[in-house]
Amino acid sequence: QYKKNNEMGRYCQAFDQLRMQLKESLEKQATLEKSRKELIASISHDLRTPLSSIRGYVEGLEDGIVHDRERFNRYMAVIKNKTESLNNQIESLFQYSQLELSDGVRDLCRRNSEELLETILKPYEVEFTDCQIRLGISRPFPKAEIDVNENSISQVFDNLIANAKRYVDENGVITIKANADVRYLTVSVSDNGSGISPEDMQHVFEHFYRAEKSRSRNYGGAGLGLAICKRIIEGHGGEIWVESTVGAGSVFRFS
């Protein structure tokens, strides 16, 4: 508590700053270690569930409990479905780890935003043609020159649209809009689904976070989709955020 403005006072002040910096460093290290442990626990949980299911059905086939073609086909369909689920989760883990290890999104190219959005979104219109969920795309797109990695931005749209599809009902509507100002292109992906509760809003972009507390498979994959979106958008020097009302839907925006 030495506060005098002399050599000893300056020494005490410098020492106290060093002490606080050390404390902050240790707290940050403890937080990272906790995050690492949670990451390993989440990976273990998410990979164990489909693996256990695959193992059970394979053992059933080995034990010869399947005697008719219909049940055999049903078992094989489940095994295939769980294998695809595992593959998707491992692919998400790979993408997330690559983004974590890199300094940002690489290979940015100067593109016209209208051409880029048309190229990315046109296939989704075809995909939704025979789907009960309706996709609405607001045109014309803005014509702005942007520095972008097309594959990465396609991944963002993939994740946001897939996320919206999980939380709307059969007659749901997903709407995509874009606008540009002097500095940024901003895109919104909105839905009229179940919405996100206020307590979940601040966590949705964290890795392995799922608002569905039961971690039900009906609500999708490993909880990495939005975390990957955040990494990609920040790697482009932009931001991503969400606005939502429970029972009315959500709007994800990125710039």
Image (cartoon, grey):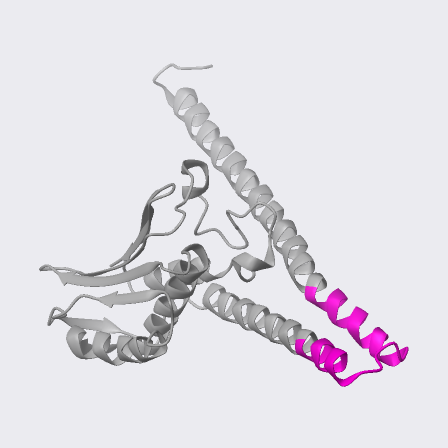
Quadrant for the C terminus in the image? bottom left
Which residue is most to the bottom?
A: 69
Residue 202: tell me if it is visible: no
Q: Which residues are magenta?
A: 50-77
174 horizontally vs 39: left or right = left
Whether 7 is drawn above or below 243: the answer is above
Q: Residue at x 45, y 67 (%)?
A: 99
Q: Nearer the viewer, residue 151 or 191?
A: 191
Instruction: Please determine whether, in this image, residue 163 is positioned above or below residue 86.
Output: above
Q: Quadrant of residue 123?
A: bottom left
Q: Is residue 238 magenta?
A: no
- Tell me the residue at 70%/61% (across/down): 49
Asked if residue 61 lies in the magenta stretch, the reply is yes
Residue 163 in view of the camera: yes
Would you place residue 236 above or below residue 214 in this image?
A: below
Give how far across and how far down residue 30 sits, in percent. Answer: 60, 42
Q: Give left or right: position of 127 versus 77.
A: left
In the displayed image of the protein, which residue is found farthest to the right? 63
- In the image: residue 168, left or right of residue 98: left
Residue at x 37% of width, y 14% of height: 4
Q: Main secondary structure of the magenta part?
A: helix
